[in-house]
Image: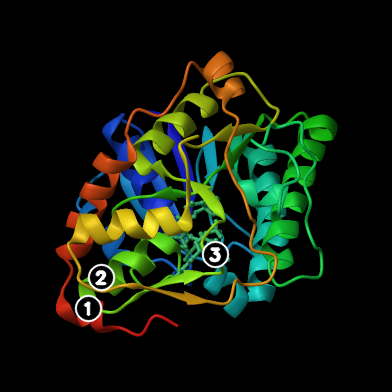
Amino acid sequence: MKRVLITGAAGFLGSHLCDKFIAEGYFVIGMDNLITGDLKNIEHLFKEKNFEFYHHDITKFVHVPGKLDYILHFASPASPIDYLKIPIQTLKVGSLGTHNLLGLARVKKARILIASTSEIYGDPLVHPQTEEYYGNVNTIGPRGVYDEAKRFQESITMAYHTFHGVETRILRIFNTYGPRMRLNDGRVIPAFIGQALRGEDLTVFGDGSQTRSFCYVDDQVEGIWKLLHSDYYLPVNIGNPDEITIKDFAEEIIKLTGTTQKIIYKDLPMNDPLQRQPDISKARAILGWEPKTGRADGMKITYDYFRSLSTEELAKEEH
Ligand code: NAD
Ligand code: UDP
């Protein structure tokens, strides 16, 4: 039986990956320190004989007994309000944490896939973003703690590949959404849906002309699966190229939820990227992957998930 270690297992993407690998017949070791994750995302797995959970901060030495075939390194705060609240931990998990996981991969002779991000392109001057674009990041801006940690993560991963022959995969994730996102994590989808459900106005930052391209979680998981099992070690963008302005997106959410609230405008956070759209030619050509779930279908499933949450959870403060 193949054994996989998934860091960030109690988070949004990590928990969906645990489900996928359990369903595919793997032995899954989930690791998380619960700083932004929640055990309720994986509690249904505790009855599985092929699932184990380690409560551990991966910036400290990581030890896992027995053989390991794969490591999926997903631990890191991922939403701007999270990494602004815990900037040092964000830098440490991307640097020290990644170093620990690469060391573990080397010792275990495991293949490691790291979760990088479209944020390494910063506020991009090339549109859509291809993997060849080097990016436009303000190192000392508020988002720098995340962006630079992820850029360092890619560099150290390539160094382990080149100098130690570790089998590495680098995944550049573009905005991904779905059930199990935290309602109060400040990312735009939980923010807008939470506001609609609480009967509050939807807060669009800036004039709402900035764009994002949203990928449904099942498509992302399929892309991760294919990249992990491919023999391609250079970075690959995985995301949905269907680009929309945040203002138009807010209007879509108003229609979806049937809220009678309106859009209100707040200041655009510093260095908020003005445009973002993945070029997925590489994923198409190398992995034979492309997203299958349109925004309307994905958002309906996501809305149903948030609607099913308790009123206490809905009432929690956002910031
Ligand atoms: P999330 O916050 O839901 O999950 C991250 C998990 O990592 C949490 O459970 C958290 O407790 C855990 N974690 C953080 N620091 C840790 C540490 N030091 N030790 C152990 N566990 C730790 O976020 P997510 O959206 O699931 O993101 C997962 C990964 O994917 C992150 O690396 C993120 O940078 C990357 N990513 C996500 C997106 C997206 O749109 N969701 C986009 C780009 C990149
Ligand atoms: N955003 C917004 N209102 C909110 C939350 C976010 O207008 O209540 C905007 C944010 O400024 C950004 C976009 O939505 O332009 C996506 O933000 P998110 O935090 O989801 O992701 P990221 O900026 O990391 O892509």
Q: State the mark number for residue 196.
A: 2
Task: Confirm whether residue 173 shows in the render.
Answer: yes
Q: Is residue 36 left or right of residue 312?
A: right
- Judged left or right of residue 296, residue 219 is right
Question: Which residue is at 41% across, 53% downward?
Answer: 248
Report the side of 41 relative to 61 (left or right): left
The reply to whether callout 2 and callout 1 are in contact (CB within 8 Å) is yes
Q: Residue at x 39, y 80 (%)?
A: 318
Residue 21 horizontal/vertical position (percent): 36, 36
Q: Give, as a three-letter code, the residue at label 3.
A: Pro
The answer to whether residue 64 is visible is no
Q: Which kind of residue does numbered mark 1 sit on?
A: Gly
Q: Which mark is residue 77?
A: 3
SS under mark 2: helix
Residue picked out by circle 1? 199
Relative to 262, say whether 212 is above or below.
above
Q: Earlier in the sequence, mark 3 or mark 1?
A: 3
In terms of secondary structure, where does tag 3 sit? Answer: loop
Say few, some or many: other residues with alpha carbon within 10 Å of mark 1 (under 14 / 14 to 19 / 20 or more). few
> Which image quarter holds the N terminus?
top left
Q: Which of pointers 3 and 2 indicates the residue nearer the eye?
A: 2
Assess disc 3: are there few (<14), some (14-19) or many (≥20) residues with their C-alpha within 10 Å of its C-alpha.
many
Q: Secondary structure at mark 1?
A: loop
- Observer-nearest of 127 and 236: 127
